[in-house]
Image: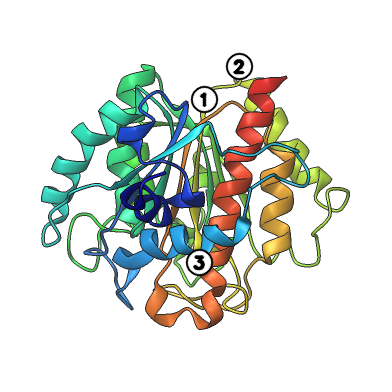
Amino acid sequence: MSHFAFLCDLATFLKVPARDALPAAPYCVAGVAWDGATTNRPGARFGPRAIRSASHMLCDATHPLFDVSPIGALADAGDLPLPNTSIDGMRAALQPAAAQLIRQHHMAWLGGDHSMTLPLLREYRAWLGRPLAVIHFDAHCDTWQDHFGEPSGHGTWVHEAFAEGLVEPACFVQVGIRSAAVREARDYVPDRGGLLFSARELRGLESPAQLAPVLAAVRERLAAHGMPPVYLSLDIDCLDPAFAPGTGTPEPGGLSTNQVLTMLEEWAGLPFVGMDCVEVAPPYDHAELASSAAATFVWSYLSGCLARAAR
């Protein structure tokens, strides 16, 4: 390996080759280094870099449950070139780039704030020709109709996705919700037939046996609707700030890393088509807790997809 290639690998997720060096990789990660829609603490534009750095501690990346490693099947497309002053400009630049990538690879997107998910869902909807099921980990419902007076932001994407027909309402699942919100926003998803498992409902439930009713409810809901393609959107603030202080809008009383890992591992057999991990803000990340959790979640997701594909 050349010195240049070695330095490039050090900048990629799991030190895998850059996409240019492995263009036929079935899986790929890409960074969306954007935080222009944050409402509290900015810094998520540095999330992709921090997640990649944290992933390097995973060594050969062989997953202890799935006994597979994404290395060899994964490339890194780097951070996409995006404007950083306009949400409309960001989305206009992101969508064509995403359209090309999702047609060539199973993608894991590294954020960035949560406003990036809406344009990604638009492209997945256009590619697949049907609404998606979504599993949404978050402290916040993201169903508000405006963004502090602006029409769109990181707290409106769920409402917009429903309004645009990007998602199957009955197959939209929210996990970890707990922030302050009026009832109309808080219950927006269940009012439209979806599932919501609040952080309060999940307190003390960590193992597969303890979470069995939740795990089964999601599987049964998807099966009842013909197992539509599933997109995973994981906001790192679904975790309690004790596990992920490095985020823009921390909310006490959240999920544990164990809870999220259990659900990711147990749902690995679902027909996932892509995922994002958003809202990691390194300036507030004591001991790199949030970036390490994010890297582990993305690695676990990719390993689960590989294991499912090998069956």
* Residue furthest to the right: 209
Neighbour class for label 1 at 10 Å: few (<14), some, many (≥20)? Answer: many
The kind of residue on which mark 1 rests is: Pro
Between circles 3 and 2, the one closer to the viewer is 3
Q: Picture quarter containing residue 252?
A: bottom right
Q: Picture quarter containing residue 112?
A: bottom left
Residue 147 image point, x, y percent: 25, 63
User: Is residue 121 visible to the viewer in this orientation of the structure?
Assistant: no
**Residue name at image x 15 percent, y 60 percent:** 84
Residue 32 position (above or below residue 200):
above
Between circles 1 and 3, the one closer to the viewer is 3
The kind of residue on which mark 2 rests is: Gly
Residue 178 position (above or below residue 33):
below
Marks 3 and 2 sit apart, C-alpha to C-alpha, by 35 Å
**Residue name at image x 71 percent, y 43 percent:** 265
Residue 182 image point, x, y percent: 44, 66
Residue 279 image point, x, y percent: 41, 63
Secondary structure found at label 1? loop
Q: Which residue is mark 2?
A: 226
Badge 3 vs badge 2, beta-carbon distance below 8 Å: no
Q: Which residue is mark 1?
A: 229
Marks 1 and 3 sit apart, C-alpha to C-alpha, by 27 Å
Q: Which residue is mark 3?
A: 291
Secondary structure found at label 3? helix
Neighbour class for label 3 at 10 Å: few (<14), some, many (≥20)? Answer: many
**Residue name at image x 26 percent, y 58 percent:** 153
Question: Mark 3 or mark 1, which is nearer the start of the sequence?
Answer: 1
Neighbour class for label 2 at 10 Å: few (<14), some, many (≥20)? Answer: few
**Residue name at image x 63 percent, y 22 percent:** 309
The kind of residue on which mark 3 rests is: Ser
User: Does 63 sit left or right of 32 as displayed?
Assistant: right
Secondary structure found at label 2? loop
